[in-house]
Amino acid sequence: MTTFMTRLRADLTLLACAAVWGVAFLFQKRAMLHIGPFLFIALRSWLACLALYPLVRRELKTAVSQDQRGSLLRLACYAGVAFFGAAALQQMGLITSTVTNSGFLTALYVVITPLFSWLFMKHRPSRWVWVGAALSFVGTWLLGGGSLTMLSHGDLLVALSAILWALHVVLVGYAASFHLSASFSAAQFAVVGLLASLAALREPIELAAILRVVPDVLYVGILSSALTFTLLSVALRATKPAEAAVIVSTESLFAALAAFLFMNETLPPIGWVGAAAIFIATLIVQLPNEADHHL
């Protein structure tokens, strides 16, 4: 019962993160009206580092060996590079892609994560995870209208970002065992901030434009970056990356709802069928894993 409750709390945490990330698409889309994608990524990342600083100081007071810190730093660098690539593709895609499409196409990483988890972590997914992943893919396809021929250039960039988001989830799963969630998140965002700052040197940088996106940066930097990615690391101590990816894929539903409420974006009936498929997938992945009964 204790294991189940721990897993349940972790899954509810992941669902809350998905809600925050889904709404974040609105702020990310709006920011692209004023500043470039790399400048936005740099601002959100450095703000996340600043927000995490008090937690990092507290964590580092615990007894941690130099080898552990070195291993964690290496993982943070890898995760930071994967995050930067994924965020860059997603943010550039949002210039022309709708909030609704971006949310759904990002959810494609739910299909890729079990493969990466199996390849790198030797976590062979249960049959229910595969069923959930397949159903999530079908749901995403239906949410796109049952056709991929009408995808814009921005849509394709967002779809490509799903590969790197899947890799990022697996890397965070590796880091979860260190129990230094805030330190890992801060280190990875420092890497992202550095890479994005260098890339942003080729973009127009104006103080007036930056001031216009302050609310967007605050939401994405603090809530959608510092808070949620730290919680992701904590939750992955009790939930495997493949299962977490299916749950977090519900961010596409939250993105669609937010886009409907605040940007008047709507879905056709086939889109709502896809939304229902993704929701059912998150329930299927909670079915007992046969391997768990043999532990």
Image (cartoon, rainbow, N blue to C red):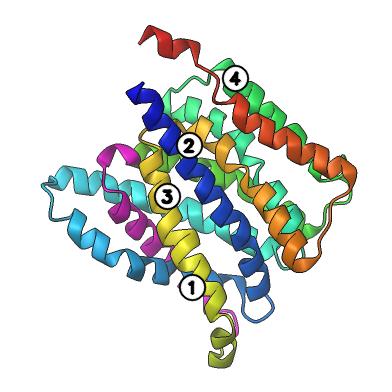
**What's the residue at 26%, 43% (across, down)?**
179
Residue located farthest toward the top when viewing the structure as drawn: 294
* Nearer to us in this view, 268 or 226: 268
Crowding at dot 3, Cα within 10 Å, few <14 / some 14-19 / many 20+, comes out as many
The x and y percentages for residue 265 are 81, 61
Question: Mark 4–mark 1 contact, CB under 8 Å?
Answer: no
Q: Residue at x 81, y 42 (%)?
A: 272
Q: Residue at x 12, y 55 (%)?
A: 61
Image quadrant of residue 281?
top right
Q: Which residue is mark 4?
A: 128
**Amino acid type of the residue tagged 3 in the rendering:** Ala
Q: Looking at the image, can residue 98 be seen?
A: no
Quarter of the picture containing the C terminus is: top left
Per the image, is 190 magenta?
yes
Magenta stretch, residue numbers: 176-205
Quick one: quadrant of the N terminus? top left
Residue marked by disc 2: 11
Which residue matches tag 3?
79
